[in-house]
Amino acid sequence: MIVATIQRVARTGVSFVIARLAAPLAVQIAFMTLLFAHAAAAEDKVSALPVVPKAGLFRAADWLLDAADAKAGVYRTADNRSLVLDNGLVRRTIRLGPNGATIGLDDLRTGASLLRSVRPEALVTIDGKEWSVGGLRGQPNQAFLLEEWLDKLTDEPSSFGLVGFRAASVEKPLEWKRTRHAEDRPWPPRGAALLLDFAGRDPAVKGVTVTIRYEIYDGIPVIGKSLTVTNKTDRPIKIDSLAVEVLAAVEGESSVDTRDVGQWRRPPIDVLSDYMFHGMDAETANVVAHWEADPGYKTQVSYGLQTPCLLVCRPPIGPGVTLQPGASLDSFRVYLIAQDSTERERQGLTVRRVWRTLAPWTTENPLMMHVRSANQATFRAAVDQCATVGFEMIIYTFGSGLQMENTGDDYIARIKADVDYAHGKGIQVGGYSLFSSRRIDDANDVINPATGKPGGAIFGNAPCFGSKWGQEYERKLKDFIARTGFDLLEHDGPYPGDRCASTTHPGHNGLEDSQWTQWETSKQLYSWCRERGVYVNQPDCYFLVGGSKTGMGYRETNWSLPRDQQMLHARQHIFDGTWNKTPSIGWMFVPLSEYHGGGAAATIEPLDAHRDDYQRHLQNALGAGVQACYRGARLYDTEATRELVTRWVAWFKKHRAILESDVIHARRADGRDVDYLVHVNPALSERALAVIYNPLPESVARTIRLPLYYTGLSGVARLRREDGAESEDVRLDAAGRAVIDVTVPPRGMTWLVIDAAPGAE
């Protein structure tokens, strides 16, 4: 009781209650002395933090145009009872007593409160029983949290109790070795962190601690969160499951009638996580963010209490990991993104800014060729062509004959000689390896929990990353990359989330820990690559653990269609794919050689015979700032095709900064009229570059409207047509739009460059 009372005093800062003790006077005096000492220490620790800045009802300046003043910090409230993470865009307030609990989540740009009720800070299931970490109870209405209720909220005695806190710095989850062109972004991102320490109080979990890490970052409306469970007991414990975040959010909409979960408008909070797989976009790949009904919210409009307004971030299964005495388990990370608008473009720009900040290696965007043969003569000839036209990377593509699982000395020496040759020409080199979309054997494949046999995995049959073969596969990949000097891993069929019921695989104990341990292996592989400057292509969202690029929008058989149809599909894929992806995050495809059939009508080879179509492919991809898989044996076959590729590569590099900036979506390709995108960046001298495509067989003159608000310009801008020396001033309306007349050649492209006019800012 003495310890519990001291902890409560330490948590509540200046307020405390003196407990009656059935003990001798000397013991009571000693207790009171210790009590006041701990209270004073806690008070001093809180008081050392600055008081949180006062916020207006909303932020006047648009953070997407200038967030230089959005600096993150850890603060205290004036009464010393709460800690605050704040960056001028979002704010999270955490009460210190009688237990640690989030009592506020606010969007400072709009003034909106995003939290309606207090919940535990985390949930951890240990040896079959779920425990709350922190949290307060007694809130009389779950629809809103009034200030006068806070002092009446009580502790749940069985929950893990807050025993300490400390401010800290943002940590690097992995190292980033910079070996190629990328945006000049800090790593780790600038910001601040807060750690809260909780201890188990029930005899069943006495000696188990949970440390929750919160992070907030400069310039983005994001709060990150993760936790570490440590076993300080003298016995093994099993972490059956955990929830890193439990957030009772303000509902996205209210509806009386029951409907399917997917039909509800969700709260204005997006969630990213590093626990992502089996998806080329964050929405499909994010398996931890669950928007659930909150049956404890009795006053909601939904008569069936079905409003999905309780965010629980937990894995689909597991971890299922046993912790030995003294061992710790680090959770996955989640990142809450507060959206300040319902408009799709603005929401997408927010997510894209977050990718650039939290995974800045995704701004690497090398021009790459996929060479179809590992034959030395073919490979070196392709390297020479890459160097000539300005490409930056070459990949032994799928079907090339490269064997990344062959680590024999003679084979390694042969490949290394070719890699050294490419490096001597300034060209980086990578290779393709297939993982999960293949069968090994019954002993090493994923075991279906329903049948106890192989088969029934996400891709039918697949190896288990925790099998003996899987462990050896990972070792061989790393050995091959390290010994050859490879600069890229193209990992096809990365771990997609398969659960494995095998109890004989050395990398996991059984079904419960199979997903967690396979994800850990994948995470470590990609982080290992990133730490060595190795670029990672993978068709899943492993960006937050080191991945670089996934599909922009990908249906392989589309590249067997007639070339005219390919062009339209390509621009549609780019238009659709860049709502939540930056141009550098998604790849496209150019079938220099036949791919998935289609014959001559679908193929660029012979290149000189199809120069116009080759140019359109280059214009589609490079004009969007997107890199494609140029797959074939060569990049040019005549002087004319060499000049063509060289010219467009040089054009891309001249405008690279703006082309790799964010896309504003203007008109989607439909084949009936012009379509166009506008790249914008208020931090560059070239504020915008619009690319306008004409799918029609004749030249067209059109009046188009350029959305230029996100250039940061107002009133007037200076326009240059293509790369001409002359410029003209154009007026911007109140919404930042300009009306421009353009002429676009038949089946061609034109572009407009927007600069700041003198005195316009």
Image (cartoon, rainbow, N blue to C red):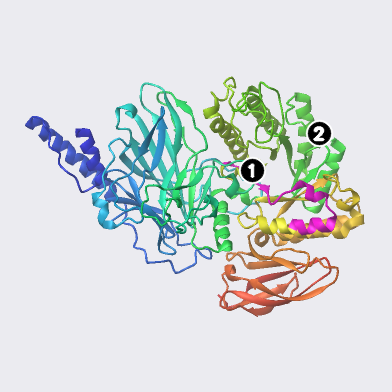
The quarter of the rendered structure image containing the C terminus is bottom right
Is residue 78 among the parts visible in the rendering?
Answer: no
Q: Which mark is residue 401?
A: 2
Give, as a single range, the part of the protein colored magenta.
Answer: 545-570
Is residue 508 located in the magenta-colored stretch of the structure?
Answer: no
Q: Give the left or right position of residue 102, taking residue 652 as reference.
A: left
How far is the residue under mark 1 from the one under mark 2?
A: 24 Å
Q: Residues within 10 Å of mark 2 (few under 14, many from 20)?
A: few
Amino acid type at circle 2 is Gly
Return the residue nearer the eye: 322 or 72.
Answer: 322
Q: Which mark is residue 540?
A: 1
The quarter of the rendered structure image containing the N terminus is top left
Q: Is residue 206 above or below residue 85?
A: above
Rendering coords of residue 189 (x, y %): 50, 50
Query: Mark 1 or mark 2: which comes first in sequence?
Result: 2
Is residue 549 located in the magenta-colored stretch of the structure?
Answer: yes
| Residue under the image location 47 percent in, 68 percent down | 61
Rendering coords of residue 173 (x, y %): 51, 41
Q: Which mark is residue 661?
A: none
Amino acid type at circle 1 is Asp
The answer to which quarter of the image holds residue 399 is top right
Rendering coords of residue 450 (x, y %): 60, 28
Q: Give the left or right position of residue 562, taking residue 242 as reference.
A: right
Q: What element does badge 2 sit on?
A: loop
Q: What element does badge 1 sit on?
A: loop
Return the residue nearer the eye: 123 or 206.
Answer: 123
| Numbered disc in front, either 1 or 2 | 1
